[in-house]
Amino acid sequence: MLHLRWTLSSWLDKLTTPMAQSLARTTLVAAALCLFALTGMADLKALAKSLFFILLANTGLVALLAMAGGRKLASRFALAANAAIVIHSCIEGFLYFQYGLTFKDSVVADALGATNTDEVLEFFVHYWPSMAMVSAFGLTALALLAWLEKRLPETAPSDAWARATSGSIALLFIALHFNPTMRAENPFFYWPRYYTTYHDSVAQLEAMRVQMAGQQDTEDLTYSGPEKHTVVLVVGESVNRANLSLYGYQRKTTPHLDAQRKDLLVFGDVVSSDAATIQSVVKMLTPATLNNPRFNPSKPTVLTQARQAGYEVHWISNQQRNDGPIQMLAEQADHAVFINQRTGRNATSLDEGLIPHLKNVLHRPAPKKFIVVHLMGAHLHYDLRYPKRFAKFKDADDRVHASMKQASRPFWIRNARNEYDNAILYGDHVLNALLSNLQRSVGPEPATFLYVSDHGQEVGHSRNFSGHSATDASGYEIPLIMWTNREDKVTAAARDSLEARPYQADVLDHTIVGLLDIRTASYQPDRDLLSADFRPPVRTLNGRSYTPHRAPSPPTSPAPPAPPNNRGVRSDIRTRTWPYGQMQQIIAANMPNRGRFRARWASSTA
């Protein structure tokens, strides 16, 4: 160790020219950014742009300052600039590491604009290990930068050639800022602009609220359904269909739904539009789609169309109030109830509390009712989503547990899977109670029950991670389940073909409008999952073309487990090869992310 320190000190003492010192700074920052990329906190394209930026900044501006004003001025400027780059990379790296997103993605600004103190606290509680790791990387890099500036010697006078070279590089660095892509790599430009964008998002959200509270556009519509009609839409939370025994999961997580299988439509190839609640639910209930994601608040929604058609519209929620656009949608109902009076999602507010409210609504005299029930479902933290009596899979030693061990899933991921499956089991109990109440209430009168999750969840399915995931198909693959006593909507002969239809939930509003027997100019039957005119859509997840990793089949019997491979990644996932040998295997088995190394849909990685 002493020999290493002596060798390093001797090497630094030889760096007496501004250009040599700038290259040393560049090397240190580049090494830190390469480590970030190696551990999954940046993709290669972002890494290349950042390396080019810091090379020009240090060899151009810093070297020129050192020649003009001496080492002290250059050192202060270099420390500030390089520290800003490292901090910027840490913040961006954490978001990319955790979600496969960047701050430039609109979903991030939307989420920040609609978040609250409770969700911030929950975020820190759940993601502190990843935040601690990123912080450790960043603080180590900053400490090394400060040490380097302290150890560098005074610079010798530079010749004309060195000054000309640095000046030319500095001019190139300045000129690159006319390119918006490269300008975004400069933290001193990036964050002020992002701050403005964030506040614009908040202002836009408030403008939407005002506009939705005022007069909305109406459109000519006709109602062609029965005189008495009840439609219940249940929106789940964070449910991956792979964890439902109804879809072939090895654990008996949905015994009640399994028992009613012959009376249900179980769609086996449905994905959400987004891996986040707000964006997904808004697209389900409004004209917004993946191709046109910005919702125009003056346009009719499913709720306003239902009211215009004579339905009494109810919104019953176990989610918290003031959840941005979702709250605005709830305010379009005739009656809205929010039962979650606790500290948001970071406390126990069980979904069964919604059951008596649904009972009350079902007994109201209105002949036509459209009821939206918004569950807490299987949202983080999973152990808060069910009472203790449903902890069936705690410390389970079964085939799922054995399969996860073979896939090198650590204890905390296996434990998270157990808690998640307990939440799914409790969700089955709640769904059965909601459906049973509807069936008893309506008797022979026409009624439909539709259950869909807002998005999926990654819980050790593809990697050592639990939570929302925009880079794994598990973050999008959702259940869509329907019960109806209307033979005009679903015939026994058509059941199998309907269940096999591929679908994406950003156009679910057309299916709902069809179930409500509403016809408008905006209704597109080719987007209605139950329509004879339905056409399979081109589906994308996080901007990438999506193809199921295996052909969907009717979910009537348990599917065989996928054999584990030696990297802890499911063998049905086509994964890119790294050039890092054994390090690849270590990180792939133990680090919780990276979309570019774990490309999940075959068509984008072929």
Image (cartoon, rainbow, N blue to C red):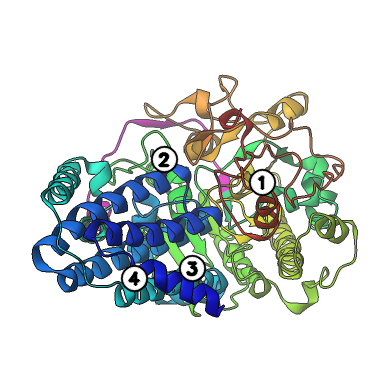
- CA–CA distance between discs 2 and 1? 28 Å
Q: Is residue 210 magenta?
A: yes
Can you give x and y, in whole percent of width and height, for residue 515 in the image? 55, 37
Kindly identify which residue carries mark 1.
Answer: 479
- CA–CA distance between discs 2 and 4? 81 Å
Q: Earlier in the sequence, mark 2 or mark 4?
A: 4
Residue 13: numbered disc? 4
Kindly identify which residue carries mark 3.
Answer: 134
Q: Are marks 1 and 3 in contact (CB under 8 Å)?
A: no
Range of magenta residues: 204-231
Q: Please report the residue visible at 31 percent of the width from the left and 68 percent of the height from the top.
A: 83
Outermost right residue: 398
Residue type, label 1: Pro
Residue 362: numbered disc? none
- CA–CA distance between discs 1 and 3? 34 Å
Can you give x and y, in whole percent of width and height, for residue 296 in the image? 29, 43
Front position in the image: 136 or 598? 136
Front position in the image: 148 or 324? 148
Kindly identify which residue carries mark 2.
Answer: 309
Quadrant including the N terminus? bottom right
Q: Earlier in the sequence, mark 4 or mark 1?
A: 4
**Front label number (2 vs 1):** 1
Q: Work out whether 464 lies above or below 143.
A: above
**Residues packed near mark 1 inside 10 Å, few (<14), some (14 to 19) or many (20 plus):** many
Q: Is residue 365 magenta?
A: no
Report if residue 329 is visible in the image. yes
Residue type, label 4: Asp
Does residue 115 appear left or right of residue 228 in this picture? Answer: left
